[in-house]
Amino acid sequence: MQMNIDLQGLRVMVTGGTSGLGLALVRQLTAKGARVAFVARTAANVERVAAETGAHGIVADIGKKDDIYPIAMQVTARLGGVDVLINNASSLGPVPLALLADTDCEELEAALAVNLLGVFRLTKALFGALAASAREGREALVINISSDAAVNAYPGWGAYGASKAALAHLTAIWDEEAKPDGIRLLVLDPGDMDTPLHALALPDADPSTLKAPDLAAFEVIEKMLDALSVRAQLLPGEHA
């Protein structure tokens, strides 16, 4: 698995950047020269990943409204703006997974707070910075990480699936609305991965049947580059 590209100067924000897909993205993006900021809730993990990769770590909770603007301010201050936002952080809702009839309102609310509202709030808080990147002739892209649970009715995945389904439609609408600002938004399903989140949901799953986070991150970055290339073709004058 090789990606012979140089992302020098590209400014990327990743949520949930200390484990699973998020960690793999931070590692690969920094290795290719991108300037990366990431957010996660546990200070020790943030410090460890920041020391390992050279990325800018932020300790905060995407699911908490009061954390959003401090995150946005730190990202723009540390990176000097933002070109790509990858909303990767996710919450399962009830653990162990539960049928909807057995799901507490607070558990559904927790899944929505991270998977939908957190994405909405952070994207909105960084929208001006993304639009500024587009005006400057840089790429401006938001990638929202989803799941096949957004389209398939898996028993026990109600809170997670409903939040991801809402996220997919939110993304589609916002992509239409953001075209005048030169910002693209897309939703990506990386597939079933061998991550702590998947192990939490299905502890008996065979890891050998799951996609490695490194491979999933490689595929996400490939799709990111495809989206940025499309934008460059649509707006050639900005890159002259």
Image (tube, rainbow, N blue to C red):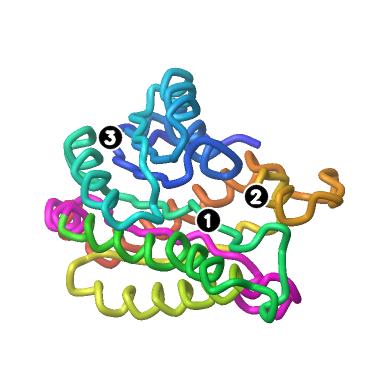
Number of callouts in the render?
3
Tell me where residue 30 sits by quadrant. Answer: top left
Q: Amino acid at mark 2?
A: Leu
Q: Are marks 1 and 2 in contact (CB under 8 Å)?
A: yes
- Which residue does the numbered mark 3 point to in the structure image? 9
Q: Which span is picked out in magenta?
A: 129-158
Q: Amino acid at mark 1?
A: Ser
Helix, strand or loop at mark 3? loop
Helix, strand or loop at mark 2? helix
Tell me where residue 150 sits by quadrant. Answer: bottom right
Q: In the visual, does 169 lie left or right of 240?
A: right
| 121 falls in the magenta region | no
Q: Are marks 1 and 3 in contact (CB under 8 Å)?
A: no
- Decide: is 164 above or below 35: below
Q: Residue at x 45, y 61 (%)?
A: 144
Q: Single out the mark in the foreground, 1 or 3.
A: 1
Q: In the visual, does 119 lie left or right of 208?
A: left
Q: Amino acid at mark 3?
A: Gly
Helix, strand or loop at mark 1? loop
Tell me where residue 53 sits by quadrant. Answer: top left
Does label 3 or label 2 sit earlier along the sequence? 3
Alpha carbon distance from label 3 to label 2: 31 Å
Q: Residue at x 46, y 72 (%)?
A: 167
The x, y position of residue 127, in whole percent, is: 21, 60
Per the rendering, the mark at residue 43 is none
Q: In the visual, does 178 lie left or right of 117?
A: left
Viewer-proximal residue, 221 or 143?
Answer: 143
Alpha carbon distance from label 1 to label 2: 8 Å
The x, y position of residue 49, in whole percent, is: 48, 26
- Which residue does the numbered mark 2 point to in the structure image? 197
- Which residue does the numbered mark 1 point to in the structure image? 90
- Decide: is 164 above or below 54: below
